[in-house]
Image: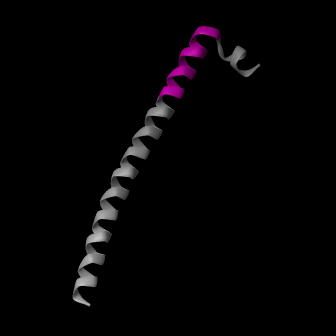
């Protein structure tokens, strides 16, 4: 019984570490993607104007 409880605690802490790393990577990639799309949008509007983007 004691060994089972210890192994379950170890698995839980390992899974939480992997989940936190995945969450940080996911958020970072999302911010990077959104930032690059925003930069492209501002560049496009500056070069061609908002009218060309809308139509």
Residue 36 in the image, given as x and y percentages of width and height:
49, 26
Q: Residue at x 69, y 19 (%)?
A: 53
Q: Residue at x 30, y 59 (%)?
A: 17
Looking at the rendering, which quadrant does residue 25 occupy?
top left
Seen as rendered, the residue at the extreme top is 47
Quadrant where the C terminus lies? top right
Q: Residue at x 50, y 22 (%)?
A: 39
Seen as rendered, the residue at the extreme bottom is 1
- With 43 as the anchor, is 10 left or right in this view? left
Residue 29 in the image, given as x and y percentages of width and height:
43, 38
- With 51 as the anchor, is 7 left or right in this view? left
- With 48 as the anchor, is 14 left or right in this view? left
Looking at the rendering, which quadrant does residue 37 occupy?
top right
Q: Main secondary structure of the magenta part?
A: helix
- With 53 as the anchor, is 27 left or right in this view? left
Q: Which residues are magenta?
A: 36-48
């Amino acid at each position: 019984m004691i060994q089972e409880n210890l192994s379950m605690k170890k698995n839980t802490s390992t899974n939480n570490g992997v989940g936190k790393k995945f969450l940080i990577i996911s958020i970072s990639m999302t911010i990077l993607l959104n930032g690059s799309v925003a930069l492209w949008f501002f560049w496009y509007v500056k070069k061609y104007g908002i009218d060309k983007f809308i139509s």
